[in-house]
Amino acid sequence: MRVLGIDPGLVNMGWGVIHIDGSRLSHVANGVCKSGKGDLAVRLLALHDQLGAVIAAHKPEEAAVEQTFVNSNGAATLKLGQARGIAMLVPARAGLAVGEYAPNAIKKAVVGVGHADKAQIAHMVKLQLPGVDLAGPDAADALAIAICHAHHLQSARAAARVVA
């Protein structure tokens, strides 16, 4: 199964695709969608189109998105929320189930603690996906989101086997 992880951002939207084979994870691709400058609507459209192209190229079967955290700048939080809407809409429109994970849950799944910094996340992503060439910190975060979703899927499958 292929999973697309998306790290929502208005300027840089990180994405990463992994393949799950049982308990083994492997890297497929990663990158960053960039919105450029200009009107908000045009920037959101650019993210929409680029993320749609990622889905068409890599054909994931599920997607996962980081939940928005609220910071002290209300306008920035609102704009991030709009980019997150694109991050959820595009995979849903493609027929993918979309999981949502809190930032601390993602960090705990990948690093082992809920308050890891970006360097620790990138390091652990490289350890869990040997040979990966990260397109930047936003792509590393997106791969971490995909890894978190993979762990969630594996736990759900294990629980289903116990119940059955």
Image (spheres, rainbow, N blue to C red):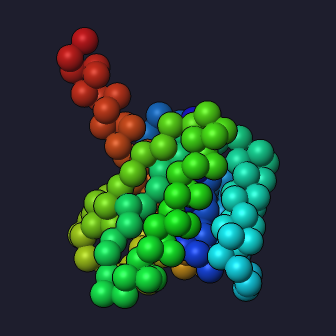
Q: Name the spot of residue 136 as percent of width and height, x first.
A: 61, 79
Q: Name the spot of residue 46 as percent of width and height, x first.
A: 75, 67
Say left or right for 4 vs 73. Answer: right
Is 66 placed above or below 43 here?
above
The quarter of the displayed image where residue 32 is located: bottom right
What residue is shown at x 33% (from left), y 67% (from top)?
A: 103
What residue is shown at x 30% (from left), y 37% (from top)?
A: 155
Determine the residue located farthest toward the top in the rendered image.
164
Q: Name the spot of residue 40 as percent of width and height, x first.
A: 65, 76
The quarter of the displayed image where residue 161 is located: top left
Res 33 visible:
no
Number of numbered discs: 0
Quarter of the picture containing the C terminus is top left
Quick one: 96 or 89, which is closer to the camera?
89
Say left or right for 49 vs 131. Answer: right
Q: Name the spot of residue 76 as percent of width and height, x first.
A: 45, 82
Res 93 visible:
yes
What residue is shown at x 25% (from left), y 27% (from top)?
A: 159
Quarter of the picture containing the N terminus is top right
Is 163 placed above or below 152 here?
above
Quick one: 101 or 162, which is closer to the camera?
101
Quick one: 53 or 85, which is closer to the camera?
85
